């Protein structure tokens, strides 16, 4: 991870494929839906008949870089994912999966929401990658709740690397402890 990627508030990281896609500079990726803040496109290795990624145009490394001020962002990402599914003919919203991979299980160091439908049709060979409640994958609703519970009460837009590393460590420890309690 380079110097430019260490923080969570960069607008564009030159060697990040998702930053390139979000700025419409990748000629191989078709953006399905976008606004000033988000972009949605098809996953290049789909695990379900409908598998899309929703990314913020601002470069944020992963869900571990988020804080309470990002709850709205997570909600808007999920909202865009649901709209894309609806636009593509998916009406059974009880058979979808929306979530984030947690480091070290991320393939690209840029926050991205996986939008999969129907969840019942996720490939057997890929199911382990998209199972909520594992160290690998957290659904968007759970992430929002964690951000609200573990977040500091102050609003910090661009935190220092040291603070972010400390926050990421705290969230990782909190998440691990929470999972242990839920598994009992």
Image (cartoon, rainbow, N blue to C red):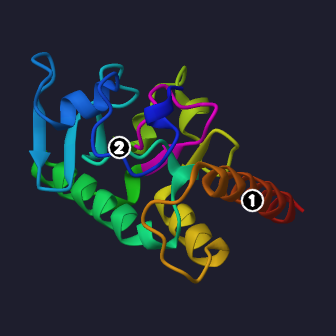
Horizontal side of 58 relative to 154 (left or right) equals: left
**In the image, what residue occupies the spot 71% across and 55% down?**
166
**Which stretch is magenta?**
98-111
Q: Residue furthest bottom?
A: 153
Q: Tell which circle, 2 or 1, labels the residue nearer the N-terminal end.
A: 2
- Magenta segment, prevailing SS (helix, strand or loop): loop
Residue receiving disc 2: 59
Q: Is residue 97 visible?
A: yes
Mark 2 → mark 1, Cα distance in angstroms: 22 Å
Quadrant assignment, res 49: top left
Q: Is residue 49 visible?
A: no
**In the image, what residue occupies the spot 30% across and 31% down?**
18
Q: Nearer the viewer, residue 4 or 139?
A: 4
Q: Quadrant of the C terminus?
A: bottom right
Above or below, comparing residue 140 to residue 117 in the picture: below
Q: Nearer the viewer, residue 4 or 93?
A: 4
Locate residue 179, reporting x and y percent: 78, 58
Horizontal side of 37 relative to 162 (left or right) equals: left
**In the image, what residue occupies the spot 52% across and 25% down?**
126
Residue receiving disc 1: 170
Locate residue 1, reporting x and y percent: 54, 26
Label 2: how many Cα within 10 Å (few below 14, some 14–19, many 20+): many
Q: Please check the rendered image and state whether residue 103 is part of the magenta-colored stretch, yes or no.
A: yes
Label 1: how many Cα within 10 Å (few below 14, some 14–19, many 20+): some
């Amino acid at each position: 991870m380079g110097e430019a990627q260490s923080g969570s508030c960069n607008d564009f990281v030159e060697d990040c494929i998702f930053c390139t896609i979000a700025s419409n500079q990748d000629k191989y990726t078709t953006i399905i839906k976008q606004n000033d803040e988000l972009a949605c496109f098809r996953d290049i290795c789909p695990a379900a008949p409908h598998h899309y990624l929703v990314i913020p145009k601002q470069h944020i490394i992963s869900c571990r870089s988020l804080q309470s001020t990002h709850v709205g962002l997570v909600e808007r990402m999920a909202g865009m994912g649901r709209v894309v599914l609806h636009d593509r003919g998916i009406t059974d919203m009880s058979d979808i999966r929306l979530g984030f991979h947690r480091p070290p299980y991320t393939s690209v160091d840029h926050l991205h929401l996986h939008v999969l439908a129907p969840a019942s049709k996720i490939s057997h060979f890929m199911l382990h990658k998209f199972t909520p409640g594992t160290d690998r994958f957290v659904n968007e609703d759970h992430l929002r709740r964690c951000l609200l519970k573990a977040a500091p009460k102050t609003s910090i837009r661009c935190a220092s690397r040291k603070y972010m590393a400390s926050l990421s460590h705290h969230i990782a420890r909190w998440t691990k402890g929470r999972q242990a309690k839920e598994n009992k």
